[in-house]
Image (spheres, grey):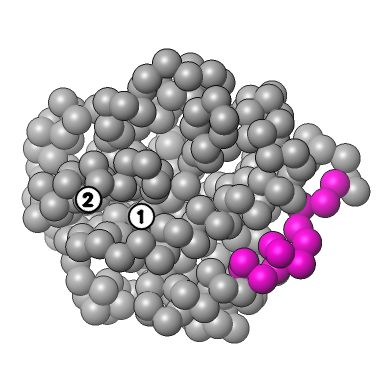
């Protein structure tokens, strides 16, 4: 995996840092080569391929909530040889046109940290780049997805934590634990830090999503990332979701990240070819790469 110093050498103005592939169970299934061709046409010079890293067998144990969210959360360990072979071929084929960084979006789940450490140690030599993200929160009945659907969100984490702002604070606390996690081969970039707001437009406009605790946790989170000189995913996918219509982080948090001098890496979070450059103009026009 590239070192932190090597990642800082990449020109962020033309780096697309968060993209999925045909190996994603909840993606479009389109060939990864078509994603790359779209990236080249969009003007990217560096393109990170960050498929959802496999989850441990224990993750799939019977639990409540959406079975679809569990079943399609990530690729399987048995698919890794084919994944690495395909991505290595694409790196060779397009090396004169674009720099491809092959890696993963890794889930931070506290109860599976030991397993994750073992897998990162096993595969880090085949990885160039990675993102550490939170997609599930613990509840009394097991892990529940944050981003599956509005109904699942309400029946799962919202019911478990009591209110949107309580979900927000639990999410940020979990993301803080991911940032504070000290382990070899850990990713240096953190994914979509406001994923908990994915369904905000399905709630009444006066719904409270932040309080003093939220603001304090944001401040602490940013201070921790800045101190480590690590990166934040400037995830633009939500701009194009009717349920969200904002980036993650949103504009206020992006300005705060810039003030904290946290480097922001453009993230299309592309799960289909048409989404490879979604929000890229907004990223450039707002100078989030500065």
Assign the N terminus to one quadrant of the image.
bottom left
Q: Which residue is mark 1?
A: 131
Left or right side of 22 for 231: right
The mark that comes first in sequence, 2 or 1, is 2
Tell me the element at label 2. helix
Of 33 and 49, which appears nearest the observer? 49
Of 32 and 253, which appears nearest the observer? 253
* Residue 117 circle label: 2
Q: Which x, y percent locates residue 36?
A: 29, 46
Asked if the stretch drawn in magenta spans residue 196, the answer is no
Q: Which x, y percent locates residue 45?
A: 30, 64
Q: Which x, y percent locates residue 257?
A: 57, 75
| Residue stretch in magenta | 207-218
Left or right side of 83 for 236: right
Comparing marks 2 and 1, which lies closer to the viewer?
A: 2
Q: Estimate how packed mark 1 is, as few (under 14), some (14 to 19) or many (20 or more) residues with alpha carbons within 10 Å.
A: many
Q: CA distance from mark 2 to mark 1?
A: 14 Å
Left or right side of 135 for 198: right
Residue drawn 23% across the image and 42% down it: 115
Residue drawn 55% across the image and 57% down it: 173
Q: Estimate how packed mark 2 is, as few (under 14), some (14 to 19) or many (20 or more) residues with alpha carbons within 10 Å.
A: some
Farthest residue, direction front? 140
Vertical order, 120 against 258 (above or below): above
Tell me the element at label 1. strand
Asked if the stretch drawn in magenta spans residue 208, the answer is yes
Q: Which x, y percent locates residue 158?
A: 70, 35
Vertical order, 178 against 52 (above or below): below
Residue drawn 39% across the image and 47% down it: 110
Q: How many marks?
A: 2
Vertical order, 279 against 55 (above or below): below
Q: Is residue 197 visible?
A: no
Residue drawn 10% across the image and 33% down it: 81
């Amino acid at each position: 995996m590239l070192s932190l110093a090597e990642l800082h050498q990449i020109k962020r103005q033309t780096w697309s840092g968060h993209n999925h592939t045909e190996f994603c169970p909840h993606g479009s299934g389109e060939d990864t080569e078509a994603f790359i061709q779209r990236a080249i046409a969009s003007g990217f010079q560096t393109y990170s391929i960050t498929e959802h890293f496999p989850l441990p067998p224990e993750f799939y144990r019977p639990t409540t909530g959406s079975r679809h969210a569990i079943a399609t959360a990530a690729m399987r360990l048995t698919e890794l040889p084919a994944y690495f072979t395909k991505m290595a071929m694409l790196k060779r084929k397009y090396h004169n046109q674009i720099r491809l960084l092959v890696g993963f979006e890794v889930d931070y789940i506290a109860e599976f940290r030991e397993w994750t450490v073992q897998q990162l140690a096993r595969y880090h030599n085949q990885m160039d780049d990675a993102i550490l993200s939170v997609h599930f929160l613990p509840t009394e009945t097991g892990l529940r997805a944050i981003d599956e659907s509005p109904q699942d969100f309400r029946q799962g984490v919202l019911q478990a934590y009591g209110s949107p702002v309580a979900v927000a604070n639990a999410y940020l606390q979990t993301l803080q634990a991911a940032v504070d996690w000290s382990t070899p081969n850990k990713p240096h970039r953190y994914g979509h830090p406001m994923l908990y707001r994915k369904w905000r437009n399905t709630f009444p406009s006066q719904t409270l999503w932040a309080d003093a605790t939220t603001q304090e946790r944001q401040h602490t989170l940013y201070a921790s990332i800045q101190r480590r000189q690590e990166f934040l995913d400037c995830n633009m996918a939500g701009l194009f979701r009717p349920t969200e219509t904002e980036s993650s982080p949103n504009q206020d948090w992006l300005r705060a990240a810039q003030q904290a001098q946290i480097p922001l890496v453009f993230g299309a979070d592309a799960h289909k070819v048409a989404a490879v450059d979604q929000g890229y103009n907004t990223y450039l026009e707002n100078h989030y790469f500065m």
